[in-house]
Each structure stands twice: as structure tokens, then as C-alpha cells.
Image: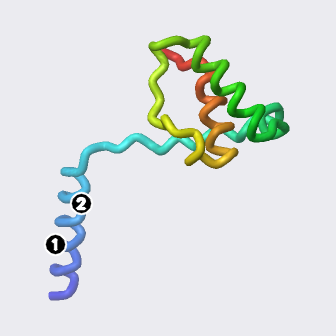
Amino acid sequence: GRDLVASYQARIAEARRALLPDTPPIKKAEPIKPSLLALGRAALEALFTERTQSWGPQLQFAHRNLDTLSDDDLRLLIQMIDTPTAE
């Protein structure tokens, strides 16, 4: 009795897992570069402005209001802009 129930439960769980879409592993963020960690808020905002202007209109980013970003989030955003993506 119990073995049969456990067997069916295992098969049902396996069938449910088979129906789930494959999810890619979550990529961990790169550690913040020491050169960016050394910069204060004003320098980070200036660097961000410089980077976005040099990229021009093709650069799209979600954060329009830098005041809402923490210093580390701003550092990560700059680092992401500076890191070329493999395509």
C-alpha cells in the first residue's frame, strides 16, 4: 500500500518536473572593480554621464533617476556599460 502510493507520488512529481520549462542558471554579478569602489558619489555620477554620452542613443537603461540608486548599484551599472557583451 504505502510503497505503491510513494511510487505514484514520485512518478507524479517527475512528470510535473518534466512539464516545467528549462530555466537557465542565474548568472552571479561580477564583483565590483576596485577602481570603481575607490570613486565617491560625485565621481560616479560624472563617470556615468560620460559613459552614457559616449555610447549615444543606442544605450538603453532602466534607471532614469540616479538619485534612487545606491552607490554600489551605480558602480555595477557603470561596470555593466564598460563590459562588452559577447554576441
Percent x, y of residue 84: 59, 18
Instruction: Identify the element where label 1 is drawn.
Output: helix
Residue type pointed to by label 1: Tyr
Percent x, y of residue 51: 64, 19
Taking depth in this image into account, of 24 and 37 the one nearest to the observer is 37
> Within 10 angstroms of label 2, few (less than 14), some, or many (20 or more) residues?
few
Relative to 50, is 15 above or below? below
Residue wearing tag 2: 14
> Within 10 angstroms of label 1, few (less than 14), some, or many (20 or more) residues?
few
Tell me the residue at 49%/37% (across/down).
63
Relative to 72, is 62 above or below? above
Residue wearing tag 1: 8
Relative to 85, is 6 above or below? below
Taking depth in this image into account, of 50 and 11 the one nearest to the observer is 50
Q: Which quadrant would the N terminus be assigned to in this image?
A: bottom left
Tell me the residue at 49%/19% (across/down).
59
Residue type pointed to by label 2: Glu
Tell me the residue at 35%/44% (across/down).
23
Percent x, y of residue 70: 64, 48
Tell me the residue at 45%/43% (across/down).
25
Taking depth in this image into account, of 6 and 75 the one nearest to the observer is 75
Q: Is residue 61 left or right of residue 33?
A: left
Q: Is the residue under label 1 in contact with that under label 2 (CB below 8 Å)?
A: no
Percent x, y of residue 58: 45, 14
Q: Based on the displayed image, in which of its 4 quarters is residue 38 positioned? A: top right
Residue 33: give its label: none
CA gap, disc 2 and disc 1:
10 Å
Q: Furthest residue to the bottom?
A: 1
Q: Is residue 30 left or right of residue 63?
A: right
Q: Which comes sooner in the sequence, label 2 or label 1?
A: 1
Instruction: Identify the element where label 2 is drawn.
Output: helix
